[in-house]
Each structure stands twice: as structure tokens, then as C-alpha cells.
């Protein structure tokens, strides 16, 4: 242990770090992640604002102004320019804080939340943290939440419904319009988890998942996924001020009097990186990247569908193929490819992020075909 | 709104960002914050690892190894080399997660936590999030938690006691040994919030606040404060594995099976920056910086004590002076100086971070004297 206590030269430390950096997996062969290499302008903006702390906005009024501009742009983008919110550490914080607001405004103790079975695992954290029962509604045959199941699970203690716009497993989108109708009829808060789909769906012409749908009370979307911002960069938006205010606590020794965020000290770098990407590419430029990801997703599906059955026709840039998933995943890993697996139905899952270009996808497809043909009965 | 949708050149975007960056306050005149300029090697390390995601450690085994090494070094530094934990987004997450573990292991519903009145405002978030009653114990005349008050507030539903090692307002340190004795006698979890003091006290020879004290079950300390790491970089440590495991949830589609952190996607950059600072300076180098901050703290106290009465003799690098605080703060702000205020007793608060060098402190002291002498009866 003694050696760790003595100082070393900058050169020596950075060279040690380079060694660790080289152990990390380059994204070029990763189809298992919803993150990607940040856009070069995101990295530049991030490093410019590396010291800035949005937890103390009076000291960082410039960074705070960038955050306000980003929130305002995204409020409009998601269909309600009066929506308000802040830049989070990502979708998990967005889901926690949305459910905390719903619970606080409801005034119900020991409440429950009805989520699709396809909801992200962060809802397990929500349940444990907030003392809420998480009721999982079964999916229909298209792997969207079954609306009858949602209605069946609602009771007097239901403080929120959740719809997913771009599920983690299949990239599927729930029927937010119908969920909204149920939520409005019952007077229940509706949260949309668009962590993945928020920066995909609008560019595919799908807009009925956000504040354009009347019953949607909150929405979370992650610039550090398909908007190519740096980590951590998520956005949480509420339709009404009272929801955000229900998260406030007093902050006596800061330059602001109240704080509604989950964390205290809060990096400005991720927020600024998201703003930089959106300003630089514009929504038109972002749209081109998303549509190219969709084209490559369909290409990969076509390349492999005579070998493996896709679980659904891709709605976003995720494609899953039915197979003996853990076995195929392990074989692909031996060839240097990272995919993940899903359980119901058993399938491998490929997320076609911007780093998965056409040539990467084709190389991956030939590897899959090679592995499958080496032992035709082992994987299907 | 239309203009925000169109792409702009990289040059144009970065020049817009420079304008916002220049609105932020340079730390050189800030005495109100427990953050500081990150060490140059922290910034270099951070930018090297800007894309890395500790939320998916199988893709970032190199970054995950740096996190493990950091945790191992700090476990030893805080007195129990077998302590385990992870790199958080900061002290607020540390306090939330420690209380969540204490609650989960206790098995008590509708529990309470006994904290000093001097506890950080993040405990208000803890109470709201976790559904715990936060019982505030009064302080003694030295502004340490009154042990009799703590004992009086404990009941069958008390799931944790909290001690502060470096309070946010005064930098005071609670009597952790005595709190530990109470906690052990009653069989209650003891958490130490050393967000600020964790990287100060050991260098001043004060070591009886950490795992060296037998009843301490968890400890949080922030490298992004006095260890000059980048934001976000906090550390949460538990003495026993079961506490950390009580935070686990299953994570089906990642490269790891379980996740105990509060957030999902989690930047590696802050963790690596903390490791880089500690490796480069060593604990000896960090100690020199801390002791210089203490020397400047005492200097500032001596410069001003014939004008204003210090609330306590500084224990860490924080000094507070009794006065009509909001009024003096406003006058100092006109001169470009940032201090914060505390309410009980009414005082201005000066945190002497590494950016507050001797010459900065002397310049600040003359400004205070000038303001005071301009209107001798207004501020005291």
C-alpha cells in the first residue's frame, strides 16, 4: 500500500492511465449499449466547462443560462414550450424524480405505480427508494404494454402510470395516446420514459409520445444516448410547475435558495455538451444521423432474417433475433463482438448506435452467419 | 425558435459557448464554495476518459479497474482496507445511499434518522425520498452535536445516527467516538458525512472520524471538494458487504448482473480524475495543500478578529465571523467577493479552498476592513 501514498510525476500517472484506457472496449464492435462515442463538439464543449457546477448556479450564471436554453429548446421539441425541468445525470434520475413528484403531489402514502413489464430496471430503484409498489403490466403480442392489464392494475393507491417510448430491450414504443386517455379519465399522473426514444422518434415522424399528448405530465430523455452528448446528460421535463416545485428543498448556504435536483453538486459539462451538439447539427443534422441508424438497422435485419427470426419489426434502431441467446452471445464475444440478450422471448439484442456504421453492421452480420453455419443446430 | 433548429458551424457554436463561459465567476474571488478549480492532472485524466461509462463496467474494464484501485486506496486511507463501495456523483448520493442501506438492512418501516442540526441539506432529500423522519439533534456550545439530545431522540424506529466530519456551515467535527459508543450500545447504524472533512482531517492528524472508530458503518467523502478532482466525484464506503448488497437490483441487459449505484449510466471521468490527483500528489502532497489552506484560514481569522468575532476557532479550513451577515455579504459582492452566510448564529462564512491563496485572503481581508470602516455601526 505504501507506494500509493507517494507522489509520482504527471508523465508517469498519465502513462499508467493510458494503460487502463486501452483496456476499455472501443465502441466500434459494441452492439450492446445505448451509449456511443460523444460527438467531437460535445467533447470540446464538455472540456471547456469541466469545472462548472450547476449545483451552485449563482457562481455559474453562464452555464446556468446554457442549461435554461437547452431546456427551452427541448421543451419545444417535445411539444410544450412551457414545460420546465433540468439536466439530470440520466434516465434513472429522471424516472426517480418524476415518480417522486407524482407521489408528492398525489398525497397518497404507500402508493403504487403501474409500469409496463418492459420498463427499465431503474424502476426497481424507484420502488425501493420511494417506497412505492411497482406493478408490472403484461405486454401485448407486439411487446407494447397491454392496456387492459394497465386498467386492471390501477387502484385507489395508484400514483402514476408509466409509458415507454423506446423500450430498452426491443426499442418498442407503448401506445402513449391510449395510456393518456386512461390517465386522464382516472386523474392519474402519466410519465413517459423516452430515455432512448426521445432523440429517435421525432426524427422518424413519431410525435405522439410527448407533451403533444394531453395526459403526459412528465418526460425523460437522454442526450447522452442518441443525441451524442457526453455522460452525464439527461433531461427531465414536467408539464406543470407544481410538479417540479414538489421536489424543492431549502439550500441555505448556496447562491440559490431552493434545489429541486436529486444531486447537489452537479456538473455543467454534460448539459453544455448536449447544447453544443444540438446547436451544431441542428435537428436536421441529428435527424440525418438517426435515419441512417434506422437504415442500418433494417439492413442488419434483412441480412440475418433468413437465418434468425427478428422478434419485432424494428420501430427504433434496435433489432433482436430469436435464438439460444447466451450461447450465441458467448460465441460472438470470442470474435470480439458485444451484444446483449433478452429473456422473454429469448433473443440477442443489437442496438444500432451511430458508431455501428453500414460496414460495421455488415462485418457483424457475416460473423453471425459464420458462427451459425459452423454449428447449425446449436443456436436456433 | 426556428434558429435553434438549424445547424451552425463548430466555430460559431464554440464562440457562443466562450461567451457563456466568461459569464461564470472565476474561483479566485469565491469564498462561498466547497468546490475549487480541479487540479490540472484531474482535468487531463477526466478528458482522457470522457466517454467512459462505469454503469456498464464490462465494456470499460480499464476504467472499472481504476475505480477499484481508488476505492481500495481510500478504504485504507479511511481506516479499513476491507471497506467496499463505489464512486458516486457526490455527497448527496452518498448520504441517500447510506441511509437507504441502513433502512433496508434494519427492516424497519416508517423509520427515523437522528442527524445533527448542522447536517447538510441533502438530508431533507433523504427524508423525502426514503420516507424517513429526519430528527434534528441540537448542537452544543461548540456547534458539535449534543450527545444527550441524540440519545433523547433515539427510539425503536431509529434506523441510523449521522455524524458530520466537517460541517458545511462551520467546518466543525462531531464527536464521532461518542456517537459510535451510543450506536454500538443501541445496535444502530452510524453514518459519517465526511463529504468536506474526509480529505482535510486526516492531514491535520485527526483520524477518529472514520472506520478506525468501531461503530462507523458507512462514510462518504468527496474528492471533488478538497481532493481537487473534477465534478462529479464522490466516494461512498461501507464497512460490511451486506450494506452494499442491500442496494443491489438486477440489470438484465448490461455486462454486469447487478447494480448498487443510484444512477445507471455513470461517468468514469470523475473517478479517474480523483485517482490521478492522489497518484500524482500522493497523500504527502495533498497534505501540504490542506495544511497551507489551514494556515491561510488562521491568517484570515487573525486579520479580521479585531473587527469581527469568529464563531468558533477553525477546526478545518472554514472560518465564520459574526456580523449582520446578509448586509455585509451584499457589500462584499459589490466589490466582487463571494461569501455565504449562516443563520445560527448570524455570520458570514468563508471557505478557504486551495484557490484562496495567502494573497487572495489578504486582499479579501482588506476589502472587509474597508467596508466595515466605511460604516462602523452597520455590520456588527
Image (spheres, coloured by chain):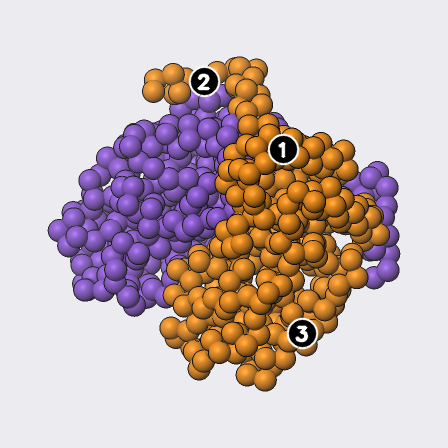
Chain colours: A purple, B orange
- Discs 1, 3 touching: Cβ within 8 Å: no
Q: In the image, are marks 1 and 3 on the same chain?
A: yes
Q: Is residue B287 left or right of residue B167?
A: right
Image quadrant where one finds the N terminus of chain A = bottom right
Q: CA distance from mark 1 to mark 3?
A: 44 Å
Circle 1 sits on which residue? B373
- The answer to whether residue A324 is seen in the rendering is no
The residue lying at 64 percent from left, 59 percent from top is: B172
Foreground: disc 1 or disc 3: 1
Q: CA distance from mark 2 to mark 1?
A: 55 Å
Q: Position of residue B256 (x, y in %)?
A: 56, 58
Q: Is residue A131 left or right of residue A185?
A: right
* Chain identity of mark 2: B
Q: Position of residue A224 (x, y in %)?
A: 49, 38
Secondary structure at badge 1 equals helix
Which badge, 2 or 1, comes first in the chain's sequence? 2
Foreground: disc 3 or disc 2: 3
Q: Residue furthest front?
A: B377
Q: Position of residue A368 (x, y in %)?
A: 53, 46
Circle 3 sits on which residue? B177
Circle 2 sits on which residue? B7
Q: Is residue B353 left or right of residue B90?
A: right
Amino acid at each position: 500500500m505504501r507506494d500509493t501514498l507517494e507522489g509520482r510525476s504527471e508523465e508517469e500517472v498519465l502513462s499508467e492511465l493510458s494503460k487502463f484506457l486501452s483496456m476499455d472496449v472501443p465502441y466500434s464492435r459494441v452492439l450492446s449499449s445505448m451509449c456511443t462515442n460523444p460527438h467531437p463538439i460535445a467533447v470540446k464543449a464538455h472540456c471547456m466547462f469541466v469545472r462548472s457546477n450547476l449545483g451552485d448556479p449563482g457562481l455559474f450564471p453562464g452555464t446556468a443560462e446554457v442549461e435554461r436554453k437547452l431546456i427551452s429548446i427541448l421543451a419545444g421539441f417535445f411539444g410544450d414550450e412551457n414545460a420546465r425541468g433540468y439536466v439530470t445525470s440520466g434516465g434513472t434520475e429522471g424516472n426517480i424524480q418524476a415518480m417522486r413528484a407524482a407521489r408528492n403531489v398525489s398525497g397518497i402514502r404507500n402508493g403504487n405505480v403501474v409500469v409496463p413489464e418492459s420498463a427499465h430496471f431503474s424502476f426497481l430503484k424507484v420502488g425501493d427508494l420511494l417506497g412505492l409498489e411497482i406493478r408490472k403490466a403484461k405486454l401485448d403480442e407486439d411487446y407494447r404494454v397491454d392496456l387492459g392489464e394497465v386498467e386492471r392494475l390501477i387502484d385507489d393507491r395508484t400514483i402514476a402510470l408509466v409509458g415507454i417510448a423506446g423500450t430498452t430491450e426491443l426499442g418498442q414504443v407503448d401506445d402513449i395516446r391510449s395510456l393518456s386517455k386512461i390517465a386522464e379519465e382516472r386523474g392519474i399522473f402519466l410519465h413517459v420514459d423516452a430515455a432512448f426514444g426521445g432523440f429517435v422518434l421525432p426524427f422518424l415522424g413519431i410525435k405522439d409520445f410527448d407533451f403533444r399528448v394531453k395526459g403526459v405530465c412528465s418526460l425523460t430523455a437522454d442526450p447522452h444516448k442518441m443525441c451524442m452528448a457526453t455522460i452525464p446528460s439527461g433531461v427531465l421535463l414536467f408539464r406543470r410547475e407544481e410538479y417540479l416545485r414538489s421536489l424543492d428543498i431549502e439550500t441555505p448556504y448556496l447562491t440559490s435558495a431552493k434545489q429541486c435536483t436529486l444531486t447537489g453538486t452537479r456538473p455543467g459539462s454534460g448539459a453544455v455538451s448536449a447544447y453544443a451538439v444540438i446547436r451544431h447539427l441542428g435537428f436536421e443534422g441529428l435527424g440525418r444521423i438517426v435515419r441512417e441508424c434506422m437504415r442500418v438497422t433494417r439492413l442488419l435485419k434483412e441480412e440475418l432474417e433468413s437465418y434468425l427470426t427478428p422478434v419485432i419489426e424494428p420501430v427504433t434502431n434496435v433489432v433482436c433475433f430469436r435464438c439460444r441467446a447466451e450461447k450465441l452471445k458467448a460465441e460472438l464475444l470470442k470474435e470480439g463482438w458485444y451484444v446483449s440478450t433478452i429473456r422473454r422471448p429469448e433473443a440477442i439484442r443489437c442496438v444500432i448506435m451511430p458508431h455501428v456504421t453500414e460496414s460495421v453492421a455488415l462485418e457483424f452480420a457475416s460473423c453471425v452467419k459464420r458462427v451459425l453455419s459452423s454449428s447449425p443446430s446449436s443456436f436456433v
